[in-house]
């Protein structure tokens, strides 16, 4: 049986949907791990659920009973290493055969921010006898909705200190397909996949694409990193989070996030979801021209 952790989060939910689809075809059981009954009630039909928490070690053995493969993902918080180590230890004790670990682009060489935390977990996992697949995805298409859509809807602009750096964005749903396939182990066992999207875009090019699909003018405004930090803090973001996000952004500004290769397409067996496809699907999230005109009026 497969266990999907973080099933209420962006990545975990997408992986669970893929695993549940496959389970419906094959009859194999899957289990989703949640931290509350409220979230567990949202699980796909036919999926068994369990309430457990990485921080509560005594809840993990029950979650792992009869489990052979685990998709492991944790929210990007300072306790990530400790929490994921707890789960890896519990997997060892439960006799889990294979773990698919959600890591981050840059974990191979960047010793700051989220990538460094993920690398520590990667090393822990590799020190065990459990078979593994490690996924290091680039920035998500969905980040445009999470981080930029609110500002675009209200002002028609979004800002960061990315300069002309390129990012090879990819869709969470494509990562989920790779994760679901990797949970079978086999040819994916022992592999580390650095996943990039099908094209590299500057933020100005991203703004142009959003403008095209939303049918309204959208502009990217480049600002100093200090100004971006102040804006994040003014919006109520904790200092630690602002600092690690800016450290991560520095990795991308250095040019490390713009690689385009054929690996994702190879793993999917089809072309990845492009940014244009994604924006066409979610164009309304950025506001329409009529909404923008109404805001000005």
Image: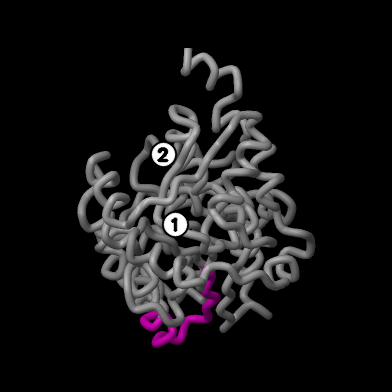
Which residue is identified by label 1?
5
Relative side of 60 to 260, left or right: left
Name the spot of residue 138 as percent of width and height, x first: 53, 64
Which residue is identified by label 2?
39
**Residue at the left extreme, as displayed:** 239
Front-most of residues 171 and 35: 171
Front-most of residues 176 and 37: 176
Front-most of residues 236 and 159: 159
**Residue at the right extreme, as displayed:** 270
Which residue is pictured at 23% across the width and 41% down the height?
A: 234
Q: Would you identify the image quadrant in which residue 254 lies?
A: bottom left
Range shown magenta: 123-136
Q: Is residue 138 visible?
A: yes
Q: Would you identify the image quadrant in which residue 251 lies?
A: bottom left
Sequence-first disc among 2 and 1? 1
Relative side of 109 to 112, left or right: right
Name the spot of residue 271 as percent of width and height, x first: 77, 59
Name the spot of residue 3 as percent of width and height, x first: 50, 59
Local SS, label 2: helix
Local SS, label 1: loop
Q: Is residue 24 above or below residue 4?
A: above
The answer to whether residue 282 is magenta is: no
């Amino acid at each position: 049986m497969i266990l999907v952790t973080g099933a209420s989060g962006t990545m975990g939910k997408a992986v669970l949907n893929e695993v549940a689809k496959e389970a419906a075809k094959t009859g194999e059981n899957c289990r989703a791990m949640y931290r509350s009954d409220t979230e567990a009630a949202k699980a796909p039909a036919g999926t068994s659920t369990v309430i457990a928490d990485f921080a509560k070690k005594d809840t993990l053995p029950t979650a792992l009973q009869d489990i052979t493969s685990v998709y492991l993902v944790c929210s990007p918080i300072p306790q990530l290493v400790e929490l994921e180590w707890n789960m890896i230890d519990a997997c060892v004790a439960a006799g889990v055969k294979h773990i698919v670990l959600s890591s981050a682009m840059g974990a191979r060489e960047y010793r700051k921010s989220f990538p460094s935390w993920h690398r520590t977990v990667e090393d822990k996992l590799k020190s065990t006898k459990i078979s593994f697949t490690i996924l290091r995805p680039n920035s998500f298409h969905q980040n445009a909705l999470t981080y930029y859509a609110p500002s675009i809807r209200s002002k028609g602009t979004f800002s960061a200190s990315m300069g002309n750096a390129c990012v090879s964005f990819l869709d969470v749903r494509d990562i989920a397909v790779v994760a679901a396939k990797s949970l079978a182990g086999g040819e994916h066992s022992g592999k580390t996949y650095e996943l990039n999207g099908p094209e590299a875009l500057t933020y100005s090019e991203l703004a142009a694409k959003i403008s095209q699909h939303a049918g309204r003018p959208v502009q990217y405004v480049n600002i100093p990193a200090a100004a971006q930090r102040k804006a994040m803090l003014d919006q109520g973001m904790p200092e630690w989070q602002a600092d690690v996000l800016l450290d991560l952004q520095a990795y991308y500004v250095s040019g490390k996030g713009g690689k385009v290769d054929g690996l994702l397409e190879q793993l999917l067996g089809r072309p990845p979801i492009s940014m244009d496809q994604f924006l066409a699907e979610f164009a309304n999230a950025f506001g329409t021209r009529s909404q923008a005109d109404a805001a000005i009026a």
